[in-house]
Image (spheres, coloured by chain):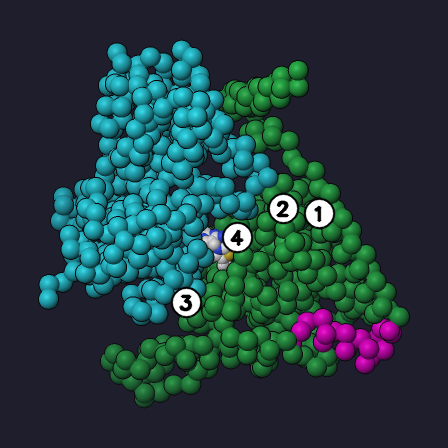
């Protein structure tokens, strides 16, 4: 059985018609692990099922369903986006190494997927991220410095989801997919979907971000069921970076993830997640489908986690460098840079100016981080409820009084 | 040669050694797996990586992928399939990566795991162990520092234990695996790397018992898990001020074994219960209630508690305020003595 066969297991009656089987299939009908892996990676080098508009060599190619018109300025803009978020990301890693952050979650390698998806969104849309979505946050207008509190331990997320259209980072795997489905149901219930004519510009959509590992969670499955049943305008944007900490994708699935959409009754598309143009094109189409009332849509952005899972992780314990080397050749920023230069869309001066801007951002990011104020102890008790709880209020008072006791005894010591 | 058993542990372990709680847990699983081919280890990243805390380090290499399972990423799946495996005769040891990630599995734990034996009128046993690294103090992001043990102690049909030192980690985990009931096994993650002597020839206490960790006469402290170390440190500081604290390590949170606490309180007349968990409707509430029922005439002061707060766990820069520490324990001791 060919590996490709396993990306589309046939029905028993098809097998019978082909004369290959009658009665129960032989045990060889179960794929070996190697066949599963080959099937999951069948598009690694491109192929019909992978939407790609910019090859790893920076060659612009066309696609019958997902071509896109972008201006030179937009191309330069996305290059700048990717360089800046990568620079902030690397600075985050460095700050953790220097003890300024408790942990950092790198996005390295996933810039194109996130910038492509993020730039496809409109201000009125809503994003429900997981925890690695620094590029999406950037596109939603959340300044990178606003991410720092989570990783320095001063807050659980400092931006306002209502004004930015960017939900808070979600660490419990998969939770946000159901929340996104519900939010999208609300968009539909409020008549913000499928309007035509003058109102169509106000149509809305929701997008939720999650990983390959997350696809095993019940919440993700349920999110897709709900979205389908309520025709909710939500794009399920799965960044398949090939790893869930130490577990490769074949620990989660037999078939490529985008193919699961068929089972829920909506389209699923695999896009080259290291190609910012393709990511933009596919996501723009998917969001438009949702806004027109044709949601939901699943997008699998095929990419690679180039760094460890987090700064606490040691990836050398479970994966080989060979894969990493192969994926380096598909770097999302490099391929766009080559394209911009070759097509004379950007000159050296532009590239240098982006680098200079990245240096400034890194400096600002670092300065902000090291100067962040410690949160006051009463913050623990603040905003636990919308309507204050007498229990928490009493605990707050007791605790502050307890702290005052120390201040008094310290003062006492001076006498 | 007779198969090694827990009663005959020296055949699988080297004599007395110094090891961490993490290593003790690892050794315990290894011993249990060597003794009983039905013992499985399953969870996220427990195989090749050896778990994010390395507690299952080396087990997959030595026992293979059919006994140490890197599962798909879903806690409901881990626990639900462990239940099925247990019905089939296996003894799964599930690892939940962090306390805050047990909740996708809560339904399976409460609806099936806890009730199976009762519903089947004892015909179906589900000897599943769920290991949960719990508690704060490691400077982590959200959902990595919680103390959800009381939620499980509240459920009939589940047993809930927590170890506080390497020797208990070693013995209690093996006992939990041998137990025919489901056991939630809470591990004090911030103490994983604390070392102590383990003499495997010393007979362990039964699993569902508490233990006096330090004798004293002034005030009784009842605690468990990561707070045992905090209370021992507090006792040392109190000793320098001439106060002798007695410490009972509860170890078993459900069923509670409170006789040693009652005995102690009858001597000291004073009790402070210490835990990281939020106080409302918690294990500490239960201990306080039962002690005032059983020891009312011996009490010289109301039972006091030192807990976290009834709030979500705070960002890590604030966790030192949330977590009971030596000062907060001693302040409660002072208040108890002042009555
Ligand atoms: C419910 C839950 N279980 C376990 C974890 C621990 N954990 C954090 S990230 C992760 C792997 C996630 O993999 P994937 O969904 O592929 O996302 P990626 O990290 O690769 O972006 C795990 C198991 C968690 N955060 N939440
Ligand atoms: Mg992943």
How far apart in space, not on screen, are marks 2 and 3 (Cα)?
30 Å
Q: Name the residue under label 3.
A: B48
Which residues are drawn in magenta?
Answer: A330-348
**Colour of chain B in the image:** cyan
Q: Which residue lies furthest to the right in this view?
A: A349
Q: The N terminus of chain A appears in which quarter of the rendering? A: bottom left
Is residue B61 placed above or below A22 in the rendered structure? above
**Colour of chain A in the image:** green
Q: Name the residue under label 1.
A: A369
How far apart in space, not on screen, are marks 3 and 4 (Cα)?
29 Å
Please give the chain letter of the residue carrying mark 1: A
Q: Do labels 3 and 1 share a chain?
A: no
First along the sequence among labels 2 and 1? 2
Q: Mark 2 points at which residue?
A: A152
Q: Residue drawn at (60%, 78%), measured in percent from left and top?
A: A325
Q: Are marks 4 and 1 on the same chain?
A: yes
Q: Residue drawn at (45%, 57%), measured in percent from left and top?
A: B52
First along the sequence among labels 2 and 4? 2
| Closer to the camera in the image, A19 or A208 | A208
Q: Do the residues labelled 3 and 1 touch (CB within 8 Å)?
A: no
How far apart in space, not on screen, are marks 4 and 1 (Cα)?
30 Å
Element type where label 3 sits in the image: loop
Say the numbered circle drawn on residue A15.
Answer: none
Q: The C terminus of chain A appears in which quarter of the rendering? A: top right
Left or right, A365 with respect to A27, comes to right
Is residue B297 placed above or below A332 in the rendered structure? above
> How far from the left and from the top, in percent, is residue B184?
31, 45
Please give the chain letter of the residue carrying mark 2: A
**Closer to the camera: disc 4 or disc 1?**
1
Left or right, B242 with respect to B120, comes to right
Q: Name the residue under label 4.
A: A177
């Amino acid at each position: 059985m060919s590996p490709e066969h396993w990306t589309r297991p046939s029905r028993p009656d098809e097998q019978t018609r082909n004369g290959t089987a009658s009665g129960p299939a032989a045990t060889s009908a179960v794929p070996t692990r190697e066949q599963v892996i080959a099937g999951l990676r069948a598009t690694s080098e491109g192929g019909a099922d992978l939407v790609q508009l910019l090859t790893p060599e920076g060659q612009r190619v066309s696609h019958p369903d997902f071509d896109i018109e972008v201006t030179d300025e937009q191309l330069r803009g996305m290059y700048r986006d990717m360089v800046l978020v990568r620079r902030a990301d690397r600075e985050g890693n460095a700050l953790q190494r220097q003890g300024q952050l408790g942990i950092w979650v790198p996005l390295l390698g996933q810039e194109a997927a996130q910038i492509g998806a993020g730039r496809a969104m409109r201000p009125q849309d809503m994003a429900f991220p997981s925890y690695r979505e620094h590029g999406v946050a950037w596109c939603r207008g959340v300044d990178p410095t606003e991410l720092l509190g989570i990783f320095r331990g001063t807050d659980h997320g400092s931006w306002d989801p209502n004004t930015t259209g960017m939900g808070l980072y979600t660490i419990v795997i998969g939770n946000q997919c159901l929340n996104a489905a519900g939010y999208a149901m609300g968009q539909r219930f409020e008549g913000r979907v499928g309007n035509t004519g003058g109102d169509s510009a106000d149509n809305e959509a929701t997008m939720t971000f999650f990983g390959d590992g997350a696809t095993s969670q019940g919440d993700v499955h349920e999110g897709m069921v709900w979205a389908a049943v309520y025709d909710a305008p939500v794009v399920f944007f799965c960044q398949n970076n090939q790893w869930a900490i130490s577990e490769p994708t074949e620990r989660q699935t037999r078939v490529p993830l985008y193919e699961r959409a068929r089972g829920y009754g909506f389209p699923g598309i695999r896009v080259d997640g290291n190609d910012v143009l393709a990511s933009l094109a596919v996501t723009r189409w998917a969001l438009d489908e949702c806004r027109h009332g044709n949601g939901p849509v699943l997008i699998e952005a095929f990419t690679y986690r180039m760094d460890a899972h987090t700064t606490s992780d040691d990836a050398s314990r479970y994966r080989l460098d060979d894969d990493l080397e192969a994926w380096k050749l598909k770097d999302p920023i490099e391929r766009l840079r080559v394209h911009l230069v070759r097509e004379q869309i950007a000159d050296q001066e532009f590239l240098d100016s982006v680098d200079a801007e990245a240096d400034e951002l890194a400096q600002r990011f670092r300065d902000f981080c090291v100067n962040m104020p410690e949160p006051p102890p009463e913050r623990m008790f603040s905003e636990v409820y919308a309507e204050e709880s007498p229990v928490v209020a009493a605990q707050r008072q007791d605790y502050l009084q307890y702290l005052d006791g120390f201040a008094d005894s310290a003062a006492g010591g001076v006498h | 040669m007779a198969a090694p058993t827990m009663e005959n542990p020296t055949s699988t372990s080297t004599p007395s050694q110094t090891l961490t709680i993490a290593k003790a847990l690892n050794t315990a699983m290894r011993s249990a797996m060597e003794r009983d081919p039905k013992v499985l280890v399953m969870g996220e990243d427990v195989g090749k990586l050896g778990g994010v805390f390395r507690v299952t380090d080396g087990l997959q290499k030595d026992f293979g992928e059919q006994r140490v399972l890197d599962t798909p990423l879903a806690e409901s799946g881990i626990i639900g399939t462990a239940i099925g495996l247990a019905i089939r005769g296996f003894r799964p040891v599930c690892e939940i990566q962090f306390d805050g990630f047990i909740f996708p599995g809560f339904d399976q734990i409460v609806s099936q795991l806890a009730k199976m034996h009762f519903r089947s009128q004892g015909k179906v046993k589900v000897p599943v162990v769920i290991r949960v690294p719990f508690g704060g103090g490691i400077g982590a992001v959200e959902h990595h520092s919680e103390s959800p043990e009381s939620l499980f102690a509240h459920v009939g049909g589940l047993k809930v234990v927590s170890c506080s030192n390497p020797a208990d980690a070693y013995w209690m985990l093996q006992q939990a695996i041998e137990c025919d009931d489901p056991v939630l096994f809470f591990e004090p993650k911030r103490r994983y790397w604390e070392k102590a002597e383990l003499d495997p020839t010393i007979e362990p206490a039964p699993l569902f018992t508490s233990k006096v960790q330090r004798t004293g006469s002034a005030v009784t402290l009842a605690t468990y898990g990561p707070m045992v170390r905090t209370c021992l440190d507090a006792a040392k500081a109190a000793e320098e001020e001439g106060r002798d604290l007695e410490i009972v390590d509860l170890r078993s949170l459900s069923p509670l074994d409170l006789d040693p606490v009652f005995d102690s309180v009858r001597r000291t007349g004073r009790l402070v219960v210490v835990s990281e968990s939020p106080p409302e409707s918690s294990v500490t509430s239960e201990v306080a209630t039962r002690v005032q029922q059983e020891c009312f005439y011996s009490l010289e002061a109301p039972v006091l508690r030192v807990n976290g707060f009834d709030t979500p766990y705070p960002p890590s820069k604030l966790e030192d305020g949330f977590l009971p520490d030596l000062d907060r324990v001693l302040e409660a001791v002072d208040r108890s003595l002042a009555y």
